[in-house]
């Protein structure tokens, strides 16, 4: 039986090609709109880096384990389209996998802490 409270978090740092950040942002938003309809999707926040004009950081929460995500999500057709469109938009990306352990100020995870 699956633990229904299990979640994984991806923090993805994207470095857009110089001058291509806005084009990349629109491409990324197309992906986010599609994945936000998935049953295991919880939340995504896109951040601009105040110190690097070409950098975006994506914070996303999914229900289930990292293994579930890696098994099921990359297979989606919209992800293939997204990946195919990155070559002239993205210089590089770094993906960090996290698991939530405590939360204040929202109810996105199952780890709310009382102050």
Image: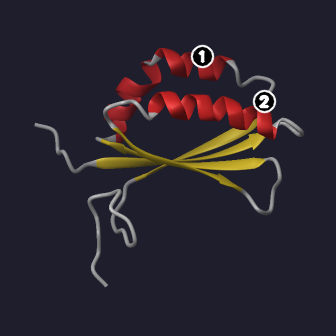
SS at mark 1?
helix
Instruction: Look at the picture and state if 20 lies above or below 56.
Output: above
Left or right? Give the position of 22 relative to 11: right
SS at mark 2?
loop
Left or right? Give the position of 52 relative to 47: right
Left or right? Give the position of 103 relative to 45: left
Quadrant for the N terminus in the image = top left
Gap between marks 2 and 1, in whole Å? 14 Å
Task: State which tag comes first along the sequence, 2 or 1.
Answer: 1
Name the residue: 40% across, 71% down: 105
Q: Is residue 109 visible?
A: yes
* Towards the viewer: 108 or 96: 108
**Quarter of the image holding residue 89?**
top right
Count of all numbered marks drawn on residues in the image: 2
Name the residue: 89% across, 38% down: 19
Name the residue: 46% across, 24% down: 74
**Residue under numbered circle 1:** 81
Name the residue: 66% across, 17% down: 84
**Quarter of the image holding residue 16?**
top right
**Residue under numbered circle 2:** 89
- 10 Å crowding of disc 2: few (<14), some (14-19), many (20+): many
* Towards the viewer: 62 or 35: 35
- How is the structure coloured here? secondary structure
Furthest residue in direction bottom, as rendered: 115
**Quarter of the image holding residue 20?**
top right
The x and y percentages for residue 13 are: 65, 47
């Amino acid at each position: 039986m699956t633990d229904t409270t299990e979640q994984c978090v991806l923090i993805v740092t994207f470095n857009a090609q110089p001058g291509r950040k806005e084009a990349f942002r629109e491409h990324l938003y197309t992906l986010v709109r599609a994945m936000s309809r998935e049953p295991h999707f919880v939340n995504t926040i896109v951040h601009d880096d105040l110190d690097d004009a070409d950098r975006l950081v994506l914070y996303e929460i999914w229900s289930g384990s990292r293994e579930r995500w890696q098994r099921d999500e990359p297979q989606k057709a919209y992800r293939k389209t997204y990946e195919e469109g990155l070559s002239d938009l993205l210089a590089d990306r770094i993906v960090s996998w996290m698991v939530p352990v405590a939360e204040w100020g929202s109810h996105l995870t199952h780890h709310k802490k009382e102050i």
